Image (cartoon, coloured by chain):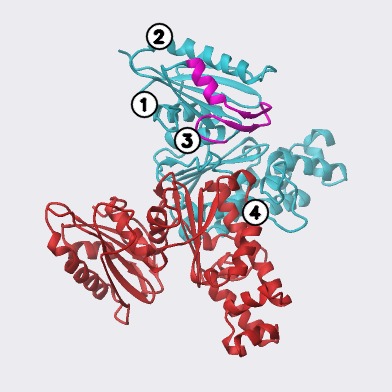
Chain colours: A red, B cyan
Amino acid sequence: MTMPPRIGVDLGGSNFRVAAFAGGDTQLATPIEVHKEPVGEARDPASIVERIASHVERLATPYLGARPVPVGIGLAAMLRDRRGTVANSPHLRWRDVNFGEQLKARLGPHYALGIYNDVNAIAWGEAVAGAARGSQNVLAVFVGTGIGGGVIAEGRLVEGASNCAGEIGHVKVRWDDAAAPCACGSRGCVEAYVGGSYVAARIAKEIAAGASPATVALAGSIDAVTPGHVDEAAANGDEWALALWTELAPLLAVALGNAIALLNSERLVLGGGFLGRAPTLYEQVLLSLAVAAPAASLEPLTVVRAELGDDAGLVGASALAAAGISTIQ
Amino acid sequence: MTMPPRIGVDLGGSNFRVAAFAGGDTQLATPIEVHKEPVGEARDPASIVERIASHVERLATPYLGARPVPVGIGLAAMLRDRRGTVANSPHLRWRDVNFGEQLKARLGPHYALGIYNDVNAIAWGEAVAGAARGSQNVLAVFVGTGIGGGVIAEGRLVEGASNCAGEIGHVKVRWDDAAAPCACGSRGCVEAYVGGSYVAARIAKEIAAGASPATVALAGSIDAVTPGHVDEAAANGDEWALALWTELAPLLAVALGNAIALLNSERLVLGGGFLGRAPTLYEQVLLSLAVAAPAASLEPLTVVRAELGDDAGLVGASALAAAGISTIQ
């Protein structure tokens, strides 16, 4: 019998992706088939369950037989356990939803189903088939609108006691009375300083107050200024842009360095849309990291950019399910 | 044939301990036999190797046969790899010593030898047979003269890429120009604020400058003041002592909370001589931790005091070797 494919699903805030990868070799990063569509408005659990199940069945039915077909779902949600219970997902507007149980019941016994935090799935994808291939100790950090992380230690994905490990965006970099409020309800989280949406808001405010005509000139108009323009202005030596990056880079670097001190990772994978469009900031973070992490922790460390882009979560979720990691019994 | 015992060795800055535990059940915390003596002055690698080997042979010889006898050594040293190469040990005055290879060569093929960082061995001991028995995700932090940590994630000891994971004492809690210098050569490490020897030095200086007659009264004289007296003074409401503990507790709590955010541990084991003798500070750290760690990370977390005391390293090192973890091939 033909080896069944492994199937990955990535359910984010905007996009819904499903992909099939050839079974057997988890290091394959290129799908046989990939389907992408907007998540759309129907986000109730029953609709999502049905939608995933119908795509999965379409891809897997020719292979159904003795072996269960691995299906891994990466979910933009805070999970509560390893049975796919969603504690909270602002993107999906879900709270306390037994998503894993529902999908498992709908799919039936022919599938090995695993539900993963989306960033964990991405981190695992980079670790098995991307920028950290071959490394047993990996920290992957993605700086997009927010900051998320995934940890691989001693070759294992660290999901933690309640499947919410890797929350590096919510490590504290300030804890005085003036620490910035974070959307998580706490204060002083590194995300509240260096997360893309927080940085964009701060830039908009300071530009509106008259900062950096050079940045505005690069953008064309005040309303068009993005963090990318600020990064370009910093590269050009603009004083305001440089000061902003010089303030933010050490905060991210300290969060990274402290994690590295704890984990002694071999690879630090950095990705995410905001950091990807801010090469000057990226370089400053690396410079700050060289001071922020212990020398002994830096010695075996290589910092690499994420490689797999949008496919990382599909690769990782399907590979996790294929390896039987946290699949629902 | 009788199951051979597992042997643990704890080589610290002051004490040299060897213990045999009944083979088979790694959860046993009580040794069959334990030997303790001062490390003494002869600390060159050859002397230490000979001393360990002769104790190990005495305990193991009756059992030598088909099965290798597990021997785990917990070493107060920074290791470089999983073959017992010591990068640096101020206690032993070693630098770049291939200790594992030497001991392996001396013992011969009848032993399964593993060399571990002492704090990792202690953490593993607490995880298999002590305060964190049964937990798969554990952070153990010991606040003595310095601050050391050990991480168990998904049931595995995290040794990291170069066997120096768990360095929570050297996470940064300050990174401005005034950040305190640490003996590690860096600045702003949590150890440089809350490590026992740093706290004691600060107390001595402030007391000498006239602070807190109430603390001096508890101690009897200025020279007799210990952190324990300061803790008692804080419990009594002494303003200076309270202010000091109120300054230090959040620093340790942030280091702990940030680690918990990353690891989503089920148990946080706190131990070490300094924290053990400062119950008021301990309580303040717990209160600060409730703010410093993300709510979702606190939910599954139980904070417990270390249970095994001086035996933890012997228990852990022997159990690691018995489980074949990082034993030298």
Whichever of labels 2 and 3 marks the residue nearer the N terminus, that label is: 2
Q: Residue at x 24, y 70 (%)?
A: A52
Alpha carbons under labels 1 and 4: distance apart? 44 Å
In terms of depth relative to the viewer, which is nearer, A129 or B171? A129
Disc 4 residue type? Answer: Ala
- The amino acid beneath tag 2 is Pro
Using the image, tell me which numbered label, if any, was put on residue B62. Answer: 2
Q: Nearer the viewer, residue A256 or A25?
A: A25
Residue B127 appears anywhere in the view = yes
Residue A51 in the image: x percent, y percent? 23, 73
For label 3, the residue is B124
Q: Nearer the viewer, mark 1 or mark 4?
A: 4
* Mark 3 vs 1, N-terminal side: 1
Magenta region, residue range = B80-107
Pointers 3 and 4 in contact (C-beta within 8 Å): no
Q: Residue at x 64, y 46 (%)?
A: A295
Contact check, label 4 and label 2, Cβ < 8 Å: no
Question: Disc 2 is attached to a residue of which chain?
Answer: B
Residue density around tag 3, few if under 14, some if 14–19, many if 20 or more, within 10 Å: many
Q: Position of residue B220 (x, y in %)?
A: 81, 34
Q: Earlier in the sequence, mark 1 or mark 2?
A: 1
Q: Nearer the viewer, mark 3 or mark 4?
A: 4
Residue B36 is tagged as: none
Q: Amino acid at mark 3?
A: Trp
Observer-side mark, 2 or 3, equals 2
Going by the numbered disc 1, the residue's amino acid type is Asp
Instruction: For marks 2 and 3, give the CA distance.
Output: 27 Å
Residue that badge 1 annotates: B25
Left or right: A53 with respect to B316?
left
Q: Identify the residue under disc 4.
A: A290
Category of crowding for the residue at label 4, using alpha-carbon neighbours closer than 10 angstroms: few (below 14), some (14–19), many (at least 20): some
Q: Quadrant of residue B6?
A: top left
